[in-house]
Image (cartoon, helix red, strand yellow):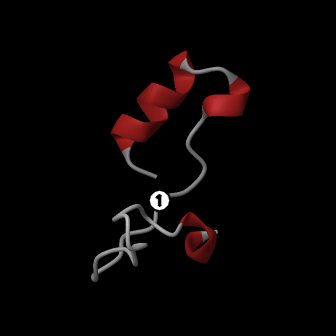
């Protein structure tokens, strides 16, 4: 993890800390209402 995320984690409660970050090259798949299909990215 990067230094900035480690610094942020120090001030956050346990349930809000950053575990991992994934970077995608393509845009998120969206519904007809233009919201992200979150179930595809778990």
Q: Quadrant of the C terminus?
A: bottom right
Which residue corresponds to mark 1?
21
Residue in the picture at 46% in, 52% down? 1
Residue in the picture at 40% in, 61% down? 35
SS at circle 1: loop
Can you tell which quarter of the image residue 3 is in?
top left
In the depicted structure, whether residue 35 falls above or below residue 30? above
Q: Position of residue 20 (x, y in %)?
A: 55, 56
Residue closest to the eye, 14 or 2: 14
In the depicted structure, whether residue 25 falls above or below residue 42? below
Q: Position of residue 4 (x, y in %)?
A: 35, 36
Q: Using a 10 Å C-alpha cutoff, classify the residue at mark 1 as few (fewer than 14 neighbours), some (14 to 19) or many (20 or more).
A: few
Residue furthest to the bottom in view is: 26
Q: Is residue 16 left or right of residue 26?
A: right
Q: Is residue 22 left or right of residue 26?
A: right
Residue closest to the eye, 19 or 24: 24
Residue furthest to the top in view is: 11
Residue furthest to the right in view is: 15
Q: Position of residue 23 (x, y in %)?
A: 36, 70
Residue in the picture at 43% in, 72% down? 31
Residue closest to the eye, 35 or 5: 35
Can you tell which quarter of the image residue 8 is in?
top left
Residue furthest to the front in view is: 32
Q: Position of residue 19 (x, y in %)?
A: 60, 49
Q: How many marks?
A: 1
In the depicted structure, whether residue 15 falls above or below residue 27? above
Residue in the picture at 63% in, 70% down? 39
């Amino acid at each position: 993890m990067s230094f900035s995320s480690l610094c942020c984690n120090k001030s956050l409660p346990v349930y809000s800390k950053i575990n991992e970050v994934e970077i995608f090259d393509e845009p998120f798949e969206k519904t007809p209402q233009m919201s992200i299909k979150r179930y595809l990215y778990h």
